[in-house]
Image: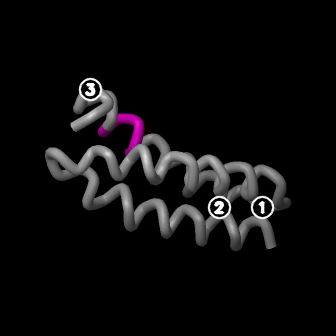
Amino acid sequence: MGNLLAYIFGLVSLVIVIPSTIPFLGWGNWLALPLIVVGIIFGALSSSDGGRNFCLIVFLIAVVRLSIGGGLI
């Protein structure tokens, strides 16, 4: 159950993160980061690692985009 919740949180976050790669929409990554962290927690509590790993990949994409844009843009 936790793995399924992690995938759901990861997919919702990915839908937010993908448009946030466009310049001046970087604020969407700040909105997605708490959702990704919740997904990582659910994935860590489950017996399978797939949902956690998916959330970690989405987290990496969001953090790299924020570091490139300086955190704001």
Residue at (32% x, 30% y) in the render: 71
Mark 2: which secondary structure? helix
Magenta region includes residue 30: no
According to the picture, the residue beneath numbered tag 2 turns out to be 51
Quadrant showing the C terminus: top left
Type of secondary structure dominating the magenta stretch: helix
Which region is colored magenta? 61-65
- Residue 38 is marked as none
Q: Do the residues labelled 2 and 1 touch (CB within 8 Å)?
A: yes
Mark 1 and mark 3 lie on one chain; the one further toward the N terminus is 1
- In the drawing, does residue 44 fall left or right of residue 73? right
Could you tell me the amino acid type at mark 1? Answer: Ser
Magenta region includes residue 62: yes
| Vertical arrangement, residue 70 with respect to residue 13, above or below | above
Badge 2 crowding class, 10 Å Cα cut-off, few under 14, some 14 to 19, many 20 or more, is: many
Could you tell me the amino acid type at mark 2? Answer: Gly
- How many marks the image carries: the answer is 3
Between 57 and 17, the one nearer to me in the picture: 17
- Residue 70 is marked as 3
Marks 2 and 1 sit apart, C-alpha to C-alpha, by 7 Å
Could you tell me the amino acid type at mark 3? Answer: Gly
Q: Do the residues labelled 1 and 3 touch (CB within 8 Å)?
A: no
According to the picture, the residue beneath numbered tag 1 turns out to be 48
Marks 3 and 2 sit apart, C-alpha to C-alpha, by 28 Å
Residue at (38% x, 47% y) in the render: 29
